[in-house]
Amino acid sequence: MLHIIASRRPDTFRAAVERLEARTGCRFLLVEEPTSLSIERLNELNPGFIFFPHWSHRIPETIFSRYTCVIFHMTDLPYGRGGSPLQNLILRGHRDTQMSALRCVAEMDAGPVYIKRPLSLEGSAEQIYSRAYALIEDMIATILIEKPEPMPQSGEVTVFKRRRPEESSMSALQSLSQVYDHVRMLDAEGYPHAFLDVGPFRIYFREAHAGTEELRASVRMVMREQP
């Protein structure tokens, strides 16, 4: 049986594909572009599951209504449906969460859940994602080997709003702990890093280390665009 893993971080999951094939006895195809998931091609491949770890594109209904599409969301659903889950969790003071594997449906993050696994939110966003990817690999194997039935979500629904790049500014923060969380939650490849505007300069911050009375970080300064 062929299964598909669709991710905008293909290099991260390339080794995972080899391990999953050895562990499950299944074949996997790794894709990174929506054009590789046309309904015509999928009809030719006829995959069993399509897994979507770290995928930011909309999944068309023509696909999820015909094929079993599994997405991974970094909250204890139905809490935290919606965008920017990692950043919204850290801003709300969470130090751990659940990674939920759920079936894709028309309503965002509302599908039935196959399994959940605990995930620590300590460290930088890149470190958290690294732990999440290892967890997702194991969850994919569990779904294929143990074949759990997805269960409807239950409980109060909380929806997160997707963050905008301008919200990476630290100008309104009031404490070192806020600065530390703000820097680390955006410290990952492809994210708008935390910044401060000083005169004509924009200063970006990464690799934050918090002490009792100070915070150290790596900085990068650029000339910001003038209106």
Image: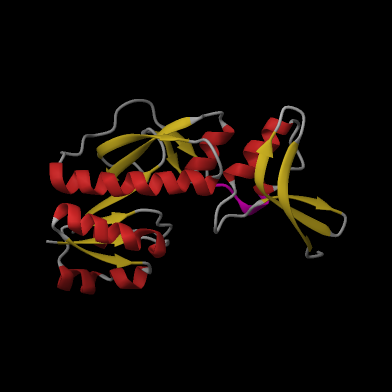
Q: Main secondary structure of the magenta part?
A: loop
- Is 73 drawn above or below residue 63 in the view shown? above
Left or right of residue 127: residue 68? left
Q: Is residue 106 among what the camera can see?
A: no
Instruction: Report the number of discs.
Output: 0
State left or right for residue 152 relative to residue 193: left
Question: Is residue 121 left or right of 26 when viewed as pictured?
Answer: right
Q: Position of residue 135 (x, y in %)?
A: 34, 43
Expressed as whole percent of the image width and height from the top left, the position of residue 23 reads 18, 52
Residue 217 highlighted magenta (yes or no): no
Which residue occupies 73% across, 42% down? 216
The quadrant of the picture occupied by the C terminus is: bottom right
Q: Quadrant of the N terminus?
A: bottom left
- Residues drawn in magenta: 162-166
**In this orientation, which residue lies closer to the viewer: 25 or 39?**
25
Instruction: Tell me if residue 35 can be seen.
Output: yes
Q: Position of residue 73 (x, y in %)?
A: 38, 43
The residue under the point 52% across, 49% down is 126
| Residue 64 position in % (x across, y down) | 25, 56
Q: What's the coloring here?
A: secondary structure
**At 77% across and 54% down in the image, what residue appears?**
203
Residue drawn at the location 27% of the way across and 60% of the way down: 17
Q: Nearer the viewer, residue 83 or 94?
A: 94
Q: Observer-nearest residue: 222 or 39?
A: 222
User: Image check: 136 left or right of 48?
Assistant: right
